[in-house]
């Protein structure tokens, strides 16, 4: 479904991605983990069109999408969330989610939608469906400003789902959430794959979220792939343990 090959990105002398490659198959939930500054968000940004790699290419369903602008990426059926909330605080929740429905229409369609009540109703129905799917259907007339953080995260997720993606990129979806909210997010990610048929690539620091739900885990360190495998393999990989927990812990674990 998605193939990234030999990506190289650097900023002001700092190498963010160094010959990094991965593939994602349709229907998978894949986790991309690593310490802060390892290149995870940079990789998301190269897929999303916010960062242009100096070398390498990204192919999605047979089409090269390297260096295309973000709105074109959405048109291909790729949506994402962000580490930091990117909601419009003074629009209603419904209006925020409707932004997602507009990402995959052409300018000609957008102009037609201004006068098309039927199309507007279709988009609102889709947005309300996503809110209901995520269990926040009672918030559509509220504004995100001042809402609980966990609800705001779900609003952003609803907006990404309103793009009707085939591939969903989740950038630290459980960041700032408490334990119960994290458990709920884990359940939601499983349902996004199982019930909506969407392939998911997730960046996350909380291993309690990613390990139970992922088919594969890829570990980035200093812009390079350190390890790749099933969750149970990654949890006992000495190189991964050393990066996350320190050399002494890794040596003790081997003993």
Image: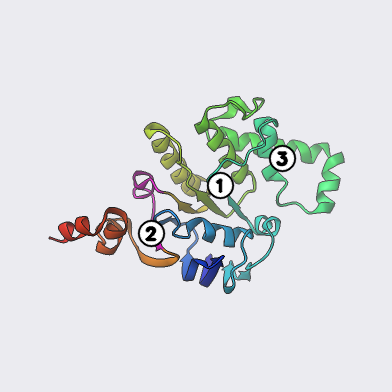
Q: Position of residue 248 (x, y in %)?
A: 20, 57
Q: Position of residue 210 (x, y in %)?
A: 38, 49
Crowding at mark 3 (Cα within 10 Å: few <14, some 14-19, many 20+)? many
Q: Nearer the viewer, mark 3 or mark 1?
A: 1
The stretch drawn in magenta includes residue 192: no
Crowding at mark 1 (Cα within 10 Å: few <14, some 14-19, many 20+)? some
Q: Which quadrant would the C terminus be assigned to in this image?
A: bottom left
Report how far apart the C-alphas of labels 3 and 1 lie in the structure.
23 Å
Q: Which residue is mark 3?
A: 123
Sequence-wise, the earlier of marks 3 and 1 is 1
Task: Establish if 171 lies above or below 230.
Answer: above
Q: Which residue is mark 2?
A: 216
Residue numbers of the magenta segment: 205-221
Which quarter of the figure has residue 11?
bottom right
In-front residue for pair 180/133:
180
Q: Is residue 41 left or right of residue 105?
A: left
* Colour setting: rainbow
Q: Position of residue 19 (x, y in %)?
A: 48, 73
Sequence-wise, the earlier of marks 1 and 2 is 1
Q: Which residue is mark 1?
A: 82
Report how far apart the C-alphas of labels 1 and 2 lie in the structure.
21 Å
Q: Is residue 127 left or right of residue 214?
A: right
Going 44% across and 45% down the picture, which residue do you hit? Answer: 190
In-front residue for pair 135/159:
159
Going 64% across and 60% down the picture, which residue do you hit? Answer: 49
Disc 1 and disc 2 in contact, CB within 8 angstroms = no
The stretch drawn in magenta includes residue 214: yes
* The disc label shown at residue 25, or none: none
Which quarter of the figure has residue 224?
bottom left
Q: Is residue 142 left or right of residue 35?
A: right
């Amino acid at each position: 479904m998605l193939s990234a090959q030999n990506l190289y990105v650097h900023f002001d002398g700092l190498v963010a991605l160094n010959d990094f490659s991965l593939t994602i198959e349709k229907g998978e939930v894949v986790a991309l983990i690593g310490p802060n500054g390892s290149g995870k968000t940079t990789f998301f940004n190269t897929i999303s069109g916010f960062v242009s790699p100096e070398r390498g290419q990204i192919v999605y369903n047979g089409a090269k999408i390297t260096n295309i602008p973000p709105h074109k990426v959405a048109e291909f059926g790729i949506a994402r969330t962000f580490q930091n909330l990117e909601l419009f605080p003074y629009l209603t929740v419904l209006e925020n989610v409707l932004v997602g429905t507009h990402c995959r229409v052409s300018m000609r369609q957008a102009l037609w939608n201004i006068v098309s009540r039927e199309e507007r109703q279709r988009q609102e129905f889709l947005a309300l469906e996503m809110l209901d799917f995520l269990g926040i259907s009672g918030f559509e007339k509220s504004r995100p400003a001042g809402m609980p953080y966990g609800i705001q995260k779900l609003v952003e997720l609803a907006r990404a789902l309103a793009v009707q993606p085939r591939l969903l990129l989740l950038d630290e979806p459980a960041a700032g959430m408490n334990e119960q909210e994290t458990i709920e997010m884990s359940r939601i990610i499983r349902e996004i794959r199982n019930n909506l048929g969407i392939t998911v690539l997730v960046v996350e620091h909380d291993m309690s979220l990613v390990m139970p739900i992922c088919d594969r885990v890829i570990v980035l360190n200093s812009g390079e792939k350190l390890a790749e495998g099933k969750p149970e393999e990654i949890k006992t990989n000495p190189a991964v343990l050393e990066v996350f927990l320190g050399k002494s812990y890794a040596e003790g674990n081997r003993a």
